[in-house]
Image (cartoon, grey):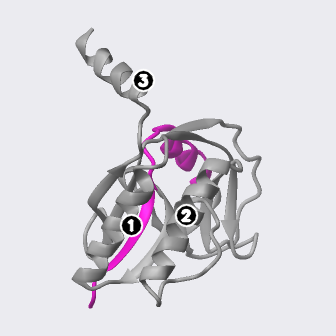
Amino acid sequence: MSTHYFLALPIEDDTFEHVQQDILPFYSYRRTYRPEEFHLTLQFLGSLDDDEVEAVKELTREVTTSTAPFALTFQQIDHFGRPDRPRVLTIVPEPSVELTTLTGTLRRKLAEEIPALDRKPFVPHVTLAKKWDTGTRIPYIAPTFTIEESVEAVVLYQINPSHTPAYEAVEAFPLKRSEEDTWRSRLKFLT
């Protein structure tokens, strides 16, 4: 079996896990994501050879060094599939110009380099659970939450289906900080 890859934003706020635990009793899924697996996929890359992996790294580095860190706001539960038995349970971000720009630039450059690239439309989301098990969803009132997630890097992940967690970070690509932010960050550690 060949190794598959994807580019994503790592999700680290503990609130995602709390929201997940609040709503899972109303659903029935075979696969529940662990907090260390939470991410927002920018582009699924599929199977890549070594040269393609290196090209992805180079292009991602090029894009991230010209993209400033930004924040995403999450306030909504959503799903893919039938409302009574959704295939995938997600949390979705509010619209973001920065996210749209980052993703559009990455996907355009990657498509030029990797002709067989998956071209499905970008639907930003963080998966909480997938693979509906049995029964139907129990009606509930969705929890109210606001999560502010800082986006500081893009990560190239490798998928290892037989491991836990199933996603392994191959390389992180920090977003460019302004010189002022860099100094502020360094000063924080000195005080």
Left-right relation of 76 to 167: right
Q: How many neighbours does mark 3 have within 10 angstroms: few (below 14), some (14-19), or many (20 or more)?
A: few
Q: Which residue is mark 3?
A: 180
**Quick one: SS at disc 3?**
helix
Q: Is residue 56 left or right of residue 49?
A: right
Tell me where the magenta segment starts and ends, as one range. 1-24
Whole-number angstrom distance, CA of label 3 to CA of label 1:
26 Å
Percent position of residue 113, x then y: 42, 81
Query: x%, y% of residue 88?
Result: 60, 69
Residue displayed at 32% across by 66% down: 58
Image mark for residue 59:
1
Q: Earlier in the sequence, mark 2 or mark 1?
A: 1
Earlier in the chain: of badge 3 and badge 2, it is 2
The quadrant of the picture occupied by the N terminus is: bottom left
Q: What is the quadrant of residue 9 in the picture?
A: bottom left
Q: Which residue is mark 2?
A: 105
Indicate the secondary structure of the residue bearing disc 2: helix
- Look at the image and say whether residue 11 sits in the magenta stretch: yes
Is residue 78 within the magenta segment?
Answer: no
Viewer-closest of 35 and 119 = 119
* 149 to 65, vertically: above or below: above
Sequence-wise, the earlier of marks 3 and 1 is 1
| Quadrant position of the C terminus in the picture | top left
The correct choice, above or below, for 4 with respect to 103 in the image is: below
In the depicted structure, whether residue 118 falls above or below residue 79? below
In the shown orientation, is residue 130 left or right of residue 60?
right
Crowd class of label 2 (few under 14; some 14 to 19; many from 20; radius 10 Å): some
Amino acid type at image mark 2: Thr
